[in-house]
Structures are given as structure tokens and as C-alpha cells.
Image (tube, rainbow, N blue to C red):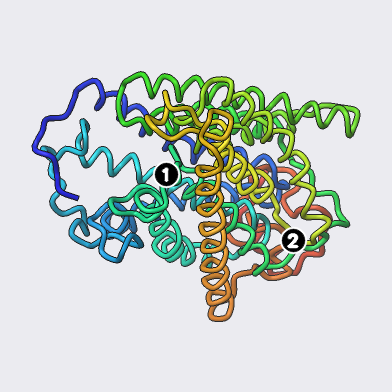
């Protein structure tokens, strides 16, 4: 992409700096959200999978990811070139629109980071940490980067040829993470005790804190995607708040009707479902549309999380039920609720646009989901065949915190939930557990 010979707008730059920091905060927020949802014996491992994704994706993005995503199209709308490999040519005076190009690149990096971290929730409690270290950079280059180029890159086929809309990442973030999570949990198989043992969240206050940080960061995610301090950013900001609220209320309504009691986990999950769904549509729909999008996601996703028990795939922390399903809902409903005042042209079915935009959204959803699932499944199978992707039975029973990281989140219950422990693990526990 040729760099514009212009100066950065200070207001837009200040807002995008703040938005970038907000989106980066979402990954530690996700770590807490996921960490609270697992059992005590694998809390630290869950946190580590998110935090290490920050480091791995950053290195890959700076080396080649940004260039392949936002470089000049090199293959008919499928992938960018390598002219900016190593961030070459992106000096402090280079401008992308009204912001410094290096800031734009950093903002987009934070999207890639959290997408990788999201996938970890599907394989919680049972993935080898070493295999995760291999998986993340390969997956980022082969799955996230191409899809991001299709949707946002210059010449990307979804953006410029198909004409599907995605304001802040329903396709490359939500649907990609959900479809990839489904593929990976099929590669690893279900956890020991799946559908038999109670696998309740061990710390619901941590889950709520993580959800709050995610919601806070989501304003940077969605409103920041306007790439300026302007009316579109303000509208996306309000739409994000509204959808999160109706998602929360929709999920609680289903819980009350179905189970007889609303839960804190349901409140957190419903808010996230609404935020997921509004991500692609926050810059395309009116406030009324945002309220409906969030409500639809809260209701549908509250049912979708139980599909894993019927279809026998162990999506540990409901990446499929919330991010894939929520992402599909939000992306498709653009074709129903898009308004010209937000999109600058395209209109949804309810506003006189006919079925055309809905059809384009559907094509994009299907292609992205199939691509992400297929390539991720292939990567997962290759890693599993060469180094093994699943932790050993002993590690899974004892807990990944102690056996992999030589640490425990809590002083009590070091050896897990009554699982049999070998003499080697017991000896290791005695070395790392503080003595009175």
C-alpha cells in the first residue's frame, strides 16, 4: 500500500493510541476470564497461554504478518506482499489515513494477538504448552493473516470483490477463532471426565473481572476501528455498549426461563456474546439494530454452548458457542440491519437493500469458517503427529500448573482433585511448594 504524503491528525492519533492500549488490555482480561473458568489445577497454564500469545504473535507480526496483511496485494486478493517485512518503510513520518502507519500496524497487531489467545479456550486443561508455542506463530501466519487480508487488506477479495462488510473483526477475529477452536478441540479430543465430572469455574469473581476488562477494552476494539476521533467512532462506541447490555439480559432471560436462576457466569457470558456479535456490525447498524444484534446473540449463544454435549466435541470454555456462533450472528445481521447513514451506501434487508448484502455476508461467513477450520485442523494434526499436542494422562490428572510450570495458583489443593499422583510428581511438588 503506498504511503500517503500527509501529516497525521493529532486528535485521531491520540484516540488510536488509547484504543490500541485498550485492545491490548483485552488479552490479560481474557486470561482472567478463562483462568476463572477452569479448575484450580490449571489456572496458571490458562493464563500463560494468553500471555505467551502476546509475545509470539508480536514477533510474527513484526517479521512478516503486517506486510502480508496490509502490504500491496500479491495474489488476486488472497495475500499481501513482503515489502514491509520487518516493518521496513514504516518510519515515524509514514501516515496511514490520518494516523502514523506504525500506530495503525500496532493497533492491528493487538487484534491478531487476542484472536490467537481466544483459541486457547477450546483446549483448556489438556494441551501441551510446548505444542502451543509452536502452534500460535504457524497458525497466525497461515490462518489469521490471510483472512485479515481478505477482509481489510488492499485488494482483499472479501472487501473489494465480494463487498461483504465487517467493521471490526467478526470474520478474522470471532469466526476465525471459533472455527479454529472447534478444529483444535477435535484434534485433541475431550478432556478426561468430559460429560461425567463436574468441571465448574473455580473463581467466578475472576471471571467477572475478566469480562469487565474485556468489555472495557472492546470500546477500543470497535470504536478504534473508525481510525479516528469522529462521529463513526462515537456511534460504534454506543452500539458496543448497547449490544453488550442486551446480550447480558438475553442470556439471563434464557437462564431464568430454562433453569430457574440467573447466574454470574451467564451474565459474563451474555455480555461477551453481545460484544462478539456487535464487533462486525457496530459500524454498519443503527442503535436499534445494535440492541437487536446483542439480544439475538445473548439468546442464541446461551443455547449454543450446550451443543457440545449433544455433538460430543469438548469446547472447554465455549469458544465455539460464543465466538463462532456470535460472530456468525453479528456478521449475517449486517445484511438485515445495515443503514446507509452508517455504511455510506450499503443497506440491509429491512432498510430496502434486498437480499444482496445478506447473501454477500453469508458467502463470507461460510468461506472464512471453512478455511479457518480446515487449515487449523491440518496444523493441529501435523503438530500432534510430530511432537504430540495433548498433555499426558498424568499431567492432565494432576494439573498442568504443577507438572508443566512447576507452580500452583493456590497454596491449598496443590495436587489437584484427588487424582492419583506418581512419586516423581510428588517429589516435584515438595520442591516447589513453600514450606511452613
- Give the vertical position of 339 relative to 311 (above or below): above
**Few, some or many residues within 10 Å of mark 2 (<14, 14–19, 20+):** many
Q: Label 2, secondary structure: give it.
A: loop
**Tag of residue 391:** none
**Camera-side residue of 166 and 113:** 166
Would you name the residue on which mark 1 appears?
111
x then y, percent, for residue 133: 47, 63
Q: Would residue 318 be visible to someone looking at this image?
A: yes
Would you name the residue on which mark 2 appears?
313
Residue at 45 percent of width and 42 percent of height: 165
Q: Label 1, secondary structure: give it.
A: helix
Q: CA distance from mark 1 to mark 2?
A: 27 Å
**Camera-side residue of 354 and 332:** 354
Task: Determine the image quadrant of residue 80.
Answer: bottom left
**Camera-side residue of 111 and 44:** 111
Residue at 79 percent of width and 48 percent of height: 306
Would residue 177 be found to the left or right of residue 162 on screen? right
Residue at 16 percent of width and 37 percent of height: 95
x then y, percent, for residue 151: 40, 49
Name the quarter where the C terminus is drawn: top right
Q: Would residue 30 be visible to someone looking at this image?
A: no
Residue at 51 percent of width and 44 percent of height: 356
Amino acid at each position: 500500500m503506498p504511503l500517503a504524503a500527509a501529516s497525521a491528525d493529532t486528535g485521531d492519533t491520540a484516540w488510536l493510541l488509547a484504543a490500541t492500549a485498550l485492545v491490548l488490555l483485552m488479552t490479560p482480561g481474557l486470561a482472567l476470564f478463562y483462568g476463572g473458568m477452569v479448575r484450580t489445577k490449571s489456572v496458571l497454564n490458562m493464563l500463560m497461554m494468553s500471555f505467551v500469545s502476546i509475545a509470539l504473535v508480536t514477533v510474527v507480526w513484526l517479521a512478516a504478518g503486517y506486510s502480508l496483511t496490509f502490504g500491496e496485494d500479491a495474489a488476486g486478493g488472497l495475500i499481501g506482499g513482503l515489502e514491509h517485512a520487518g516493518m521496513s518503510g514504516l518510519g515515524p513520518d509514514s501516515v496511514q489515513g490520518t494516523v502514523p502507519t506504525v500506530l495503525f500496524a500496532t493497533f492491528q497487531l493487538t487484534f491478531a494477538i487476542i484472536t490467537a489467545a481466544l483459541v486457547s479456550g477450546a483446549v483448556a486443561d489438556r494441551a501441551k504448552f510446548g505444542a502451543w508455542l509452536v502452534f500460535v506463530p504457524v497458525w497466525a501466519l497461515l490462518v489469521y493473516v490471510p483472512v485479515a487480508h481478505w477482509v481489510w487488506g488492499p485488494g482483499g477479495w472479501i472487501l473489494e470483490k465480494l463487498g461483504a462488510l465487517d467493521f471490526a473483526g467478526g470474520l478474522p477475529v470471532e469466526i476465525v477463532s471459533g472455527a479454529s477452536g472447534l478444529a483444535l478441540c477435535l484434534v485433541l479430543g475431550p478432556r478426561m471426565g468430559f460429560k461425567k465430572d463436574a468441571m465448574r469455574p473455580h473463581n467466578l469473581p475472576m471471571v467477572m473481572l475478566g469480562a469487565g476488562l474485556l468489555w472495557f477494552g472492546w470500546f477500543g476494539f470497535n470504536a478504534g476501528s473508525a481510525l479516528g476521533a469522529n462521529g463513526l467512532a462515537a456511534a460504534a462506541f454506543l452500539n458496543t455498549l448497547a449490544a453488550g447490555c442486551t446480550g447480558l439480559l438475553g442470556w439471563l432471560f434464557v437462564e431464568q426461563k430454562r433453569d430457574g436462576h440467573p447466574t454470574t457466569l451467564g451474565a459474563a457470558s451474555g455480555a461477551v456474546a453481545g460484544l462478539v456479535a456487535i464487533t462486525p456490525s457496530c459500524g454498519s447498524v443503527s442503535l436499534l439494530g445494535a440492541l437487536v444484534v446483542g439480544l439475538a446473540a445473548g439468546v442464541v449463544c446461551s443455547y449454543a454452548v450446550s451443543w457440545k454435549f449433544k455433538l460430543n466435541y469438548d469446547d472447554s470454555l465455549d469458544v465455539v458457542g460464543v465466538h463462532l456462533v456470535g460472530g456468525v450472528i453479528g456478521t449475517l445481521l449486517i445484511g438485515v440491519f445495515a443503514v446507509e447513514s452508517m455504511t455510506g451506501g450499503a443497506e440491509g434487508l429491512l432498510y430496502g437493500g434486498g437480499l444482496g448484502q445478506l447473501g454477500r455476508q453469508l458467502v463470507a461467513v461460510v468461506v472464512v469458517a471453512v478455511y479457518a477450520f480446515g487449515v487449523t485442523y491440518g496444523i493441529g494434526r501435523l503438530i500432534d503427529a510430530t511432537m504430540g499436542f495433548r498433555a499426558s494422562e498424568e499431567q492432565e490428572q494432576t494439573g498442568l500448573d504443577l507438572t508443566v510450570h512447576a507452580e500452583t495458583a493456590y497454596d491449598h489443593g496443590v495436587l489437584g482433585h484427588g487424582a492419583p499422583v506418581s512419586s516423581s510428581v510428588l517429589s516435584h511438588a515438595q520442591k516447589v511448594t513453600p514450606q511452613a
